[in-house]
Image: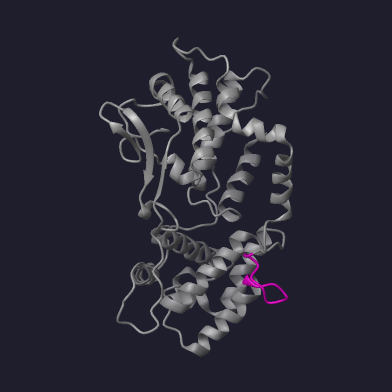
Amino acid sequence: MSDAHFDRYEEELETRLACKNSKREAKRARQLWNQAVETVPGWPSTKVSTGKKHEGYCFAWSAFPAPLKAAVDAYSAKRSTRDIFAKNAAEPLSPRTLADHEFKARQFASALVRSGVEIESLGQLRDLLDPDRLQTGFRFFLSRSNGEITTQIIGIACALASIARWGSGMSEAELASVNNVLNKVRRDETGHSRGRRAGMTAKNKALLRQFDDPANVAKIVYAADILCEGLPPQAPLTVRQAQIVRTALMIELLLVFPIREANLASLRLGQHIQWSQPGRRGVVSIYIQPGEVKNDQDLEVQLPARTTRLLEYYLKHALPLLGDPTAPWLFP
């Protein structure tokens, strides 16, 4: 392993997975690698730098003409609420989706600049959406994915289609030209959406096929018990043991309360995790409000006794070793 491998990892995060904090995640991976060099017997002895010299292809909004960012902000404001008096008004988008569209607009604008377009010429949304420039921008992304139309590339095309329709002020004829290019990315030769599949992918089917074996199902159902086997019920834990308990609790919670990774990571004591009696006693429930969930549907579950016991053990013995015990986060 070398710096070049981590450079490539960050590039994959940024270009193929559309990770919004690619630099932070890549730096964290470098730090963990160096930590393993020092603490894990038999680990390769080569350390890597924790600061990546290459800054990636994305420019900050401050590098672009101010009117472009203002136009993106106006689009976001328009799509954040619905005007009940407007004819053919668009359905409002969630803050998460709007942030994603803003990021993808910046990605595409940066791709144009990296492809030779003068940054000063990108003053309005229609400057991004010129059919020739659309082709230029998508050729940039395709060159980085070896010609594969990835999920990230499809996502950029979908975001640009929404921005063109609701934020650019283009005429129907102009929109038709824009969509003619975007549809080459969004749709396959039969006209079906590339990003939508009928059923699961072959890869996901293969992953799930292992659970046709009851023994593998048991390993998941009893994963928390397996991980925590042999841990002292009362004696102090090591940091590594506390991390194992944290993993066990995460798995247990996902089994009884399937939620998205972001919701799991943001669980707060007292806010999401609630007790029926003062002093963290009684029945334990988890409640997530609609605004925190992607589909705007509230989520609620009452934890079974075995999950509650693991939660109590984690709070008492593991959490104090993993972060500030006064902080509200369940998983700091």
What residue is rendered at 33% in x and 82% in y? 86
Q: Position of residue 145 (x, y in %)?
A: 68, 58
Specify the quadrant that holds the N terminus.
Answer: top right
Q: Which residues are magenta?
A: 186-196
Residue 16 percent across, percent down from the top left: 61, 55
Q: Residue pushed farthest bottom?
A: 173
Name the image quarter holding the C terminus. Answer: top left
Q: Identify the image quadrant of residue 74.
A: bottom left
Q: Which residue does the image show at 41% across and 72% down from the upper left? A: 91
Image quadrant assignment for residue 92: bottom left
Question: In this rendering, is residue 263 above or below 102?
Answer: above
Is residue 274 among what the camera can see?
Answer: yes
Q: In the rendered structure, does residue 303 fall within the stretch colored magenta?
A: no
Answer above or below: position of 51 versus 145: above
Task: Return the residue nearer the eye: 13 or 204.
Answer: 204
Q: Is residue 70 left or right of residue 3?
A: left
Q: Residue furthest left?
A: 278
The percent position of residue 139, horizontal first and vertical second, equals: 65, 68
Viewer-proximal residue among 328 and 316? 316
- Which residue is at the front of the view, 44 or 287? 287
- Total label count? 0
Image quadrant of residue 303? Answer: top left
Give the residue drawn at x 51%, y 77%. Answer: 129
- Image height of 205 relative to 193, above or below: above
Residue 50 visible to an observer of this rendering: no
Q: Tell me, yes or no, whether the highlighted magenta stretch contains residue 191.
A: yes
Q: Nearer the viewer, residue 216 or 70?
A: 216
Residue 121: x and y in percent read 46, 74
Colouring style? one colour
Q: Is residue 156 above or below residue 321?
A: below
